[in-house]
Every structure is written in structure tokens, then in C-alpha cells.
Image (cartoon, rainbow, N blue to C red):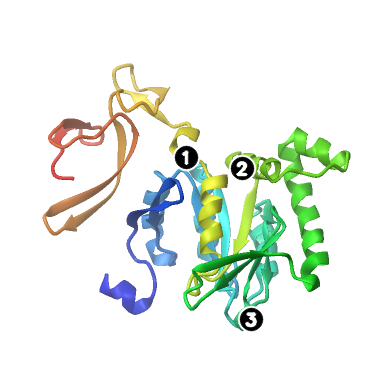
Amino acid sequence: MELEKERGITIQSAATYCSWKDIDVNIIDTPGHVDFTVEVERALRVLDGAVLILCSVGGVQSQSITVDRQMTRYNVPRIAFINKCDRTGANPERVVGQLRDKLNLNAVMIQLPIGLESELEGMVDLVTMKAIYFDGDQGDDIRYDEIPENLKDEAEEKREELLDAVSMFSEELMEAMLEEEEIPVELIQAAIRKGTLDLELAPVMIGSAYKNKGVQPLLDAVETYLPCPTDVVNTALDLDNDEEEMTVSNNPDDPLVALAFKLEDGRYGQLTYVGTYQGTLRKGETIFNTRTGKKVKVGTF
């Protein structure tokens, strides 16, 4: 929308997708402004996982609290991404504290910034204990290096905090820590993933979307820590059995179960955005609208 470009904010939810490495990611961009809360509510009903984006200067605001409550209501696992770390006054540590105090999230930093404000160069990955730099004008030349000497002590301290927080989700990790063994990266990632999917952990990442710093590791985290559709258990009402609650199968050959979460007037008529939980939606087929009790023919995709 022209108004979105003019104001620099999202007004309507927009659906798109991208391919990242060997996976396809379906993305729904939702408004962050308080006036468009209903748009967020509709989108969250069909999301398997979410990225809660916060400003490193403004921190947790009233709308952040509203969106977090909506995520909790629909059992949506989340990663927190503290954006705009290149701006004057950026303070990710303060925002993490707000996530804990205002949202009551078990927020744990899995990255440490290398510089802030105009000196933001990259971040330290506390899982792999490597420094990540984003070179080039667009930040698309990613370089992995050793942790800067002046950040080694802080990185070790933050990693200990991370391990303490995620060890409760993995007995194997806890045993390795007690025996002071070298801990495999995969073990830490598995513990973070379990805590996230159980809605008991919120991994926190940092960066600057405008400068394209931290976006690539965020996509890696979406793949590693957030659920794919087959990880999520969804339920529906069986209309042939007195609306008894049933678990949908994720099987494309079973009867269709889907939710239309957004309607808009497109160039060629009404455009309907649908989240499919079971079965396959095909052009020309007739489906049953449970809200109206009527059958509907599927038009053009």
C-alpha cells in the first residue's frame, strides 16, 4: 500500500514466502501499530511460530504486550528479535529486562552485539561462540571469525547464563555441564528448540534489519528453533460426530480442514488467504463453509 510506504509501517497483514537454504518459509507480516490489532489476531490463528520484533531504543511498548498476549492465547512459540541496534540510544540489555519484567517471558540472549549504534559491526553467536560480521554496503557478505578479545569475558559470562537457562530442557545437557564436558552445539540447539516449542523459553536475537545485519542468523534460528507444520498439533470439530474435538492429521489425502484468516478485494475479485491444516485445496473443488453452513466452489489460485 502507498500509505504503508509513506508512513513506514505495516497496516495490512501481508503473506509471502522465501526459500532459505534447504527450506521454504511462509511469512505473514503483521502490523505493529495499536490501531491494527485485529489484523494481528487473525494472522496469529494460523501461525506455527512467530518472531516478536522490538525496537532496541523504544523497547517493550503497550502494543508489544498486546501481541505477546495474543501469541500466548494461540500457543504460538516465539523468537524475540531486537531490531534497530544501529540507532542512537540502542540498549538490547534493557529490552531483554523488559521482556522478563513486562511480558514475564523466560527471555535468554543467544547473541551478544559487537558494537552498538553507529559502531554496530555484528554479533557473537553464544551457541557456537563465533563472531559474525556483516561486510559490504548491504551487509550481505557474512564473515565468521574469532570473538574479539575485549568481548571474550562477557561472551563467556553470557554463555553460562544461556546454558543455565536451557539445561532444564535437556538432561543430557545438564549432565554434560555437571561433568564439565565439552558441550556439542547440536545439544544446545536441541535444548533451545525444546524450550521454545514448549512455550517456556524465548530466545533473543539482535540486529538491524535496515542495515541487513542479523537477518541471516535470524532465518537460521527460524529453521532451527521454530516448529515446522508437522511439529504442531492442531484440533478441529468433527461435524459428523456432534462437533466432537478431533486432532487433524496433516495428511494431504484426508478431508480438507482449513481456516480463511484474511479477505481482501483483489484485482480480479475477492482474495482469500487460507491456512491449510489437513487435506489439499484444489481449484474447482467444492468445500464446506462451517460459518455460513453453505458450500463454496474454489475459484482461481
Residue to which mark 1 is pinned = 228
Please state the horizontal and vertical placement of residue 15, each as a whole percent of the image.
Answer: 33, 54
Query: How many angstroms separate mark 3 from mark 1 (CA)?
Result: 36 Å
Give the image quarter of residue 30.
bottom left
Earlier in the chain: of badge 3 and badge 2, it is 3
Give the quadrant of the N terminus.
bottom left
> Label 1 is placed on what type of residue?
Cys
Query: How many angstroms separate mark 3 from mark 2 (CA)?
Result: 31 Å
Give the image quarter of residue 116.
bottom right
Earlier in the chain: of badge 3 and badge 1, it is 3
Residue density around tag 1, few if under 14, some if 14–19, many if 20 or more, within 10 Å = some
Query: How many angstroms separate mark 1 from mark 2 (CA)?
Result: 12 Å
Kindly identify the residue that appears in the image at 71 percent across and 57 percent down: 126
Q: Disc 3 vs disc 1: which is toward the camera?
A: 3
Of helix, strand and loop, which one carries label 2? helix
Give the image quarter of residue 9.
bottom left
Residue density around tag 2, few if under 14, some if 14–19, many if 20 or more, within 10 Å = many
Kindly identify the residue that appears in the image at 54 percent across and 53 percent down: 220
Does residue 105 appear to the left or right of 3 in the view shown?
Answer: right
Residue to which mark 2 is pinned = 193
> Label 2 is placed on what type of residue?
Arg
Task: Residue 61: tell me if it is visible.
Answer: no
Residue to which mark 3 is pinned = 119
